[in-house]
Every structure is written in C-alpha cells, then in structure tokens.
Amino acid sequence: MKIIIISFFLILFVSSQNNAQDLLNELESIESNNIPLLPEKFLVTKKIFWGKKGLMRNFNRFKLTPENRQNELKLRKSMFKAHQILGFITLGEMLVQGIIGSQLYKGNMDIKNAHETMGMMVNITYFTNASIPLFSPPKMFNERKGLSNIKLHKILAIVHFSSMIATNILAHKTHTNYDLRKYHKAAAYTAFGSYAASMIVIKF
C-alpha cells in the first residue's frame, strides 16, 4: 500500500514539470503583433481584478500593455506553481485525514482531536488553493473547443468543491445525528477521489 501511494505522488510530481509549457508558449506569443492582450472569455472573478477595467488596472504596473501582460503571465506561472505545491500538500492531508477518520469510525475516540485538527488543516490548504485559479491573471488565449484535460479538470473541481462543502456541513451534523456519518464519509471520499483525479488529468 505504501509503495502504491509513493508511486502515485512520484508520477504526479514528475508529470507536473510538463505543465509549464503552455505558459511559456503564452509568453512567447505576446511578442507577436496583432494578438489580443486578453482572451474573449474568462472567469468573472478574474475580470474583477484583471479585466480591461479591473481593479489591478488602477496600478501603473498592471496597465494593459504588452509588457505588463508579459509580467502578468509570469505572475500567473508562479501562482500555478504554488497551486501545484498546495495541491500535493492538500492531497496528502486528505489521505492522512481519511486514515484517521476510518480509525475514528471504528471506535477509537482518542484520535478525535487529531481528526478535527487535520480537518482544519485540510480546509485551510484546500480553500486557499482553490482561490488561486479564481483570482490569477487570465491566460492569453481562449480555451480550445471540445473536451480537454483543462475542461475535465474544471468539471472535477466542481465535484470536489461541492463535496468539500458537503463534508464540512455533515461534519457538524454528525455531532447530533450519528446516522449521518455514512453520508459524511461518502462526501469525504468523493472529495478525495475527485481531487486526486483532477490532479491526474491536468498532468497528462
């Protein structure tokens, strides 16, 4: 079991080195002529900060120019490296939390505090990491049509985000209603499974 877990994380780490290529292509393309500085469509959360009239455009450093957009893409690259690192940390925490939780469900109440502490750590790293793609500078180009690993990653993100919300809600409900423990467990496993899957699809 330990060998499988170590191999899983090793594969994710090695494959993550390929993820920077798209960002390098964007940096090179910005030097070309007649290329729009912003994609036609991107998240509302990004538009608030990085749109043509976004909050960040009030600072000279982030005025919408080719040079500044190049700096934005470098910032985007750094933010997504942090996103990857936090992703590994969060996945590891989820795994540990699952092991602790399974022991707790078997009646080992001595680890109840450890379960709650780890749950808080998972929430901090998970929701911090979830904010990075929501508020990072937008990419240069529109997404390709059809199903891609990026779109599949986003679909799975909706699944694990919803599962994380459900897990937290049910965690509080189980204190007064033990019958909900199986739903809490199912939500937690769904969050872990979809989160791990979202990391895998973005790497390959």
Image (cartoon, rainbow, N blue to C red):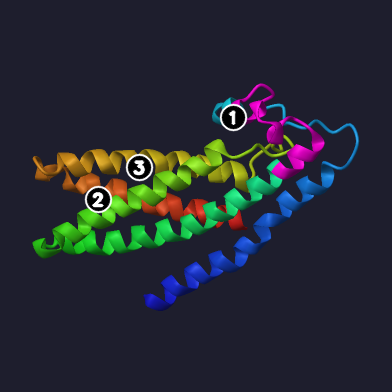
Residue stretch rendered in magenta on the structure: 49-71
Residue mark closest to the camera, 1 vs 3: 1
- Count of labels shown? 3
Residue 106 location, quadrant: bottom left
* Rendered view: 12 above or below 48: below
Amino acid bearing label 1:
Phe
Earlier-in-chain disc, 1 versus 2: 1
Residue 118 location, quadrant: bottom left
Q: Between residues 120 and 67, which one lies in front from this camera angle?
A: 67
- Badge 1 crowding class, 10 Å Cα cut-off, few under 14, some 14 to 19, many 20 or more, is some
Earlier-in-chain disc, 3 versus 2: 3
* Rendered view: 174 above or below 196: above
Say which element carries label 1.
helix
* Rendered view: 179 above or below 63: below
Distance from disc 1 to disc 2, alpha carbons, whole Å, reads 37 Å
The residue located at (21%, 44%) in the rendering is 171
Asked if the magenta segment contains residue 59, the reply would be: yes
